[in-house]
Image: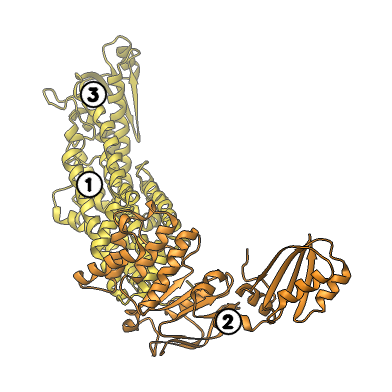
Chain colours: A orange, B yellow
């Protein structure tokens, strides 16, 4: 796969504040590349620098192998943007909005008409073409926002937190749509602070915080970077300190906590972690009610790498 | 882009209200308010009136001319039957004896009115209106004298030719004579034109990626920014001109407002005023902070103040500024527009008109040059 986007040593300062600090990234053709980080980590700033909207202090940005600049009109023809805020006109209908923004790229009326209809079909807004945006629900507005960004069939699409304040049903539709775009050949750069989405959607992920690269790789590669590989929770009554110490001394276990009859064990990679602990407690005569095991999330990755939660709620 | 820009404007209820509907509603209200006064006067019989002149001077002479012109026997404009009295005491005695209905006492700079004890509403309205109008009119001449003596002389000459300011027929009251009531209609039109600044602010919102997310789509697209600016400006100027043309037609044919005889100059005024307002809006949009709505609200406040200070509600305000703080009239956009239109319709003062138009066009060119230079920008320090 060829490289569609390359960013090397990007630095963006706002006076004393360094918003992006020597950021490197590389996006290959046909992949969904996730840019994950908490609010204010520099995701949107990075996107805006890549799109030549923002002046930056240092670095090199190439799209389709060519340097990106405000006057790089040939490159811009192949780019689509779905901004974080719903960027449509309230006084135009759904159809008119898509036609208007598609018209910035496609001048031929017949081609545009076809593309607009395909975009409407893609986001399933056929029943709402004559509606004004203020008559649409939040989820439908987001879909319109997407349609306006992809109607001209770009090869590289930037989705900047497209699911903020969207209900779960619409969110799933949006995520499915993005996968479909990838399947049709588009390359997608997706920013979000929702780790579940990124985990579900992205082929490769770059985690950033305060403008710094924290980690980069596939979901598996990122999870492999941290010690914790399993979180085991067991509901068991009356555990004494001796039993807890025994659990702590088990293979792969590096963290144990016990509160409100909930035993929580964090373990490193091992094939039989759950069985080992359950056997140990059974041997000591403890009766267990519920047992479950979770894989670490990207939040755990972020927590372990930065010492703080990914979500900033 | 051009087509959708026009559609957006037509569907913008708020914008259309301030630019188009509100001025017409205000004019309609004024029309009905003044119309009733003049219709009322139209139905009245001439009233026995005594005029006493204290001292000699231009002010007294002008008022005598006015009252005499309204007392011409057989004239359709006759409001008074002028009687003589040697002193105020004698006149008051006639008033008490119901031999006269109104006494005017004119001295240097003032006109006093005395009415019968059982005076009618008609006599009170007519006498009060004539005295007040004359005072305002004289003040207008005095103010004009300080600013533009040639223009002031035209007003004086008009007055000397027995041009009346308050007459019985509505079409004359709103007609070709220099009439302070016209000022309110003209400045209402100017107010509507100035509200077109909102279109300039919307242009900033459409084209600056650091102001709105919509503009981000423009900047990321391959469309040329310079072309976008020109198209967006043209898409606002053309509907703006159409709106003002409709308003002018309503003013002329529905409300009977005199708009002068030189339609070429009027067209020049309309085009330059609309372009000025939109470019003024662009500058406001670039200077103010916040989102498009916040910038629009700030501009609305500025326009309201500008229009108020240009005499939309108190017609003497520009005169006061001319006397004590003349630079203010030169920098207040509403006054600059008002004066251009007023001179076009009242004074036949081509020189004065072109001076104001030149000022409007000059400012438009400066505003547009700054606006285009800034709006063409495609890369920002922060978004």
List x then y, in percent, for residue B218: 35, 71
List x then y, in percent, for residue B65: 21, 32
Q: Nearer the viewer, mark 3 or mark 1?
A: 1
> Do pointers 2 and 3 mark residues of a single chain?
no
Q: How far apart are the two marked residues, 1 and 2, measured between alpha carbons?
A: 69 Å
- Residue carrying label 2: A220
Q: Quadrant of the C terminus of chain A?
A: bottom right
Q: Residue at x 79, y 79 (%)?
A: A250
Q: Chain of mark 1?
A: B
The answer to the question of whether label 1 and label 2 lie on touching residues, with beta carbons closer than 8 A, is no
- Residue carrying label 1: B247
Q: How far apart are the two marked residues, 3 and 1, measured between alpha carbons?
A: 27 Å
Q: Quadrant of the N terminus of chain A?
A: bottom left
Number of residues whose C-alpha sits closer than 10 Å to that of mark 1, classed few (under 14), some (14–19) or many (20 or more): many
The first of marks 3 and 1 along the sequence is: 3
Determine whether, in the image, residue A309 is placed left or right of residue A139.
Answer: right
Nearest the camera: B2 or B367? Answer: B2
Q: Residue at x 51, y 72 (%)?
A: A200
Asked if one can make out residue B378 in the rendered structure from this viewpoint, the answer is no
> Residue A49 — which label?
none
- Residue carrying label 3: B40
> Do pointers 1 and 2 mark residues of a single chain?
no
Q: Say what secondary structure mark 3 lies in.
A: helix
- Asked if residue A147 is positioned above or below residue B70 in the image, the reply reads below
List x then y, in percent, for residue A17: 60, 77
Nearest the camera: A47 or B137? Answer: A47
Number of residues whose C-alpha sits closer than 10 Å to that of mark 3, classed few (under 14), some (14–19) or many (20 or more): some
């Amino acid at each position: 796969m060829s490289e569609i986007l390359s960013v090397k040593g990007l630095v963006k300062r706002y006076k004393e504040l360094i918003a992006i600090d020597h950021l490197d990234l590389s996006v290959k053709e046909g992949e969904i590349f996730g840019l994950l980080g908490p609010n204010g980590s520099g995701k949107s700033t990075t996107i805006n620098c890549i799109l030549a909207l923002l002046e930056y202090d240092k670095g090199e940005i190439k799209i389709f192998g060519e340097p990106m600049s405000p006057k790089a009109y040939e490159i811009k023809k192949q780019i689509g943007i779905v901004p974080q805020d719903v960027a449509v006109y309230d006084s135009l209908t759904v159809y008119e909005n898509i036609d208007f923004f598609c018209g910035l790229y496609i001048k031929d009326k017949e081609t545009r008409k076809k593309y607009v209809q395909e975009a409407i079909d893609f986001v399933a807004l056929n029943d709402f073409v004559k509606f004004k945006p203020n008559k649409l629900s939040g989820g439908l507005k987001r879909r319109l926002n997407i349609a306006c960004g992809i109607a001209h069939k770009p090869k590289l699409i930037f989705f900047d937190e497209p699911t903020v304040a969207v209900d779960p049903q619409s969110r799933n539709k949006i995520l499915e749509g993005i996968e479909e775009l990838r399947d049709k050949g588009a390359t997608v750069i997706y920013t979000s602070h929702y780790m579940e989405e990124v985990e579900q959607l992205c082929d490769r992920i770059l985690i950033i915080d305060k403008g710094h690269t924290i980690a980069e790789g596939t979901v598996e590669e990122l999870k492999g970077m941290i010690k914790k590989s399993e979180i085991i929770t067991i509901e068991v009554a009356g555990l004494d300190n001796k039993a807890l110490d025994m659990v702590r001394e088990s293979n792969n276990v590096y963290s144990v906590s016990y509160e409100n009859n909930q035993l929580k064990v964090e373990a490193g990679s091992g094939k039989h972690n759950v069985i080992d602990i359950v056997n140990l407690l059974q041997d000591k005569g403890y009766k267990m009610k519920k047992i479950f095991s979770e894989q670490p999330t990207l939040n755990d990755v972020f927590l372990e790498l930065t010492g703080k939660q990914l979500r900033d709620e | 882009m051009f087509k959708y820009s026009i559609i957006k404007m037509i569907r913008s209820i708020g914008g259309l209200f301030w630019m188009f509907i509100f001025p017409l509603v205000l004019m309609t209200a004024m029309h009905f308010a003044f119309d009733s006064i003049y219709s009322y006067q139209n139905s009245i019989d001439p009233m026995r009136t005594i005029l006493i002149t204290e001292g000699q001077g231009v002010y007294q002479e002008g008022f005598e001319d006015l009252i005499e012109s309204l007392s011409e026997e057989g004239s359709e404009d006759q409001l008074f039957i002028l009687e003589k009295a040697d002193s105020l005491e004698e006149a008051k005695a006639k008033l008490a004896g119901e031999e006269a209905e109104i006494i005017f006492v004119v001295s240097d700079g003032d006109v006093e009115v005395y009415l019968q004890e059982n005076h009618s509403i008609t006599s009170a309205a007519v006498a009060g209106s004539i005295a007040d109008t004359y005072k305002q009119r004289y003040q207008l001449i005095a103010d004009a004298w300080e600013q533009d003596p040639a223009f002031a002389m035209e007003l004086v000459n008009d007055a000397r030719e027995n041009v009346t300011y308050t007459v019985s027929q509505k079409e004359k009251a709103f007609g070709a004579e220099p009439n302070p009531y016209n000022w309110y209609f003209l400045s209402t039109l100017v107010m509507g034109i100035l509200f077109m600044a909102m279109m300039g602010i919307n242009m900033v919102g459409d084209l600056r990626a650091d102001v709105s997310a919509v503009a981000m789509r423009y900047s990321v697209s391959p469309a040329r920014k310079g072309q976008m600016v020109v198209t967006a400006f043209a898409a606002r100027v053309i509907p703006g001109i159409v709106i003002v043309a409709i308003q002018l037609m309503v003013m002329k044919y529905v409300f009977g407002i005199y708009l002068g005889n030189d339609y070429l100059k009027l067209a020049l005024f309309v085009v330059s005023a609309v372009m000025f307002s939109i470019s003024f809006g662009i500058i406001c949009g670039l200077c103010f902070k916040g989102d498009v709505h916040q910038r629009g609200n700030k501009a609305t406040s500025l326009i309201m103040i500008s229009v108020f200070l240009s005499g939309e509600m108190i017609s003497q305000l520009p005169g006061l500024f001319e006397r004590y703080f003349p630079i203010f009239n030169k920098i207040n956009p509403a006054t600059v527009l008002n004066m251009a239109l007023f001179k076009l319709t009242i004074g036949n003062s081509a020189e004065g008109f072109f001076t104001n138009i030149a000022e409007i066009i000059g400012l438009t060119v400066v505003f547009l040059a700054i606006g285009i230079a800034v709006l063409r920008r495609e890369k920002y320090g922060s978004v």
